[in-house]
Image (cartoon, helix red, strand yellow):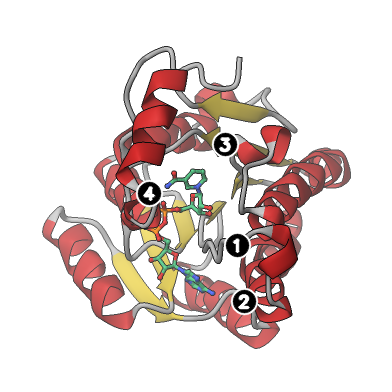
């Protein structure tokens, strides 16, 4: 029960890593606001959290909209009266080689993975600063550091997330708010289902632990960073990638 009575917002919590993080947080005593634009899976995920005995609430939201970001935080305050943890997990890919990438592909990925993180953090940080405490956790990726063929847009957002994480660690730290990121390797979710099998096999071979990550591997890192055990960790980017990036 490492998050007993903490209120956590998890964006993109309807599927994959976000859903697993919501379940693990709920199992550790957190009250959860699950925000996603996938209404069907989001509502189903909230039912799963309630079945675990947790207080949970679904907000249909697109994190790339400033109104929706404000609405997510307002819902947390209305339901639970505080915002202790924000996990900026919502993210998409729209892959393509540089010379073939349409501006729509660029704009959508920047809008969700980068601007969405900025908007949700801006809304939550105001509340956390007033509380004098809070934890913000961002979804980075190994590709922030190493790049990846076909992911100009995605790599730019994840490198941007690392820069924002370090900036906010400095800005918000003095107000009692910690900001960290997790940089997963390749994790088995809907996102990687789109990647051809032979590319995934190559990724496994390059990973010293010779497997893809599971959503629980990443959720465990979020749980640790959200908990008081990480109370002196600020501005870190924790690689959870089976050794891929070393
Ligand atoms: P996923 O595709 O399984 O889940 C992403 C969730 O975000 C979905 O529920 C989707 O509906 C939601 N979402 C997308 N755009 C949204 C928006 N505008 N507003 C609200 N919700 C939105 O993806 P996965 O794999 O669970 O990824 C989660 C995060 O982890 C992403 O930020 C991703 O970039 C990052 N990541 C994933 C890796 C992987 O190998 N799966 C590796 C490194 C990072």
The residue lying at 69 percent from left, 76 percent from top is: 102
Q: Position of residue 18 (x, y in %)?
A: 39, 54
Residue 57 relative to residue 164: left or right: left
**Element at badge 4?**
helix
Q: Can residue 219 be seen in this view?
A: no
**Element at badge 1?**
loop
The residue lying at 53 percent from left, 75 percent from top is: 72
**Element at badge 2?**
helix
Q: How far apart are marks 3 and 1 (CA)?
A: 24 Å
Q: Distance between the residues labelled 4 and 1?
A: 23 Å
Mark 1 lies within 8 Å of ligand 1 (Cβ measured) = no
**Looking at the image, which residue sits at the far bottom?**
67
Q: Splitting the image into 4 quarters, where does residue 24 fall?
A: top left
Q: Which label belongs to residue 182?
A: 3
In the image, 156 versus 204, the foreground residue is 204
Mark 4 lies within 8 Å of ligand 1 (Cβ measured) = yes
Q: Nearer the viewer, mark 4 or mark 2?
A: 4
**Looking at the image, which residue sits at the far front?**
99
Q: How crowded is mark 3: few (under 14 residues within 10 Å), some or many (20 or more)?
A: many
Q: Which label's residue is closer to the chain start, 4 or 1? A: 4
């Amino acid at each position: 029960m490492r998050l007993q009575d903490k209120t956590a917002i998890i964006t993109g919590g309807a599927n994959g890593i976000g859903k697993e993080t919501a379940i693990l947080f709920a199992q550790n005593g957190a009250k959860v606001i699950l925000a996603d634009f996938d209404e069907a899976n989001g509502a189903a995920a909230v039912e799963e959290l309630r079945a675990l005995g947790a207080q949970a609430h679904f907000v249909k939201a697109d994190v790339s909209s400033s109104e929706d970001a404000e609405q997510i935080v307002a819902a947390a305050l209305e339901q639970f009266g505080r915002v202790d943890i924000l996990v900026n997990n919502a993210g998409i890919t729209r892959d393509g080689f540089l010379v073939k990438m349409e501006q729509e592909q660029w704009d959508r990925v920047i809008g969700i993975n980068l601007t969405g993180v900025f908007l949700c953090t801006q809304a939550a940080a105001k509340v956390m600063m007033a509380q004098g405490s809070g934890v913000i956790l961002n979804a980075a990726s190994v590709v922030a550091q190493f790049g990846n063929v076909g992911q100009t847009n995605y790599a730019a957002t994840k490198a941007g997330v690392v820069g924002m994480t370090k900036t906010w660690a400095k800005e918000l730290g003095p107000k009692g708010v910690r900001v960290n990121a997790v940089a997963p390797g390749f994790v088995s979710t809907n996102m990687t289902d789109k990647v051809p099998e032979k590319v995934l096999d190559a990724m496994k071979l390059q990973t010293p632990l010779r497997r893809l990550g599971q959503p629980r591997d990443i959720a465990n890192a979020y749980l640790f960073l959200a908990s008081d055990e990480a109370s002196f960790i600020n501005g870190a980017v924790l690689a959870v990638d089976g050794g891929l990036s070393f």
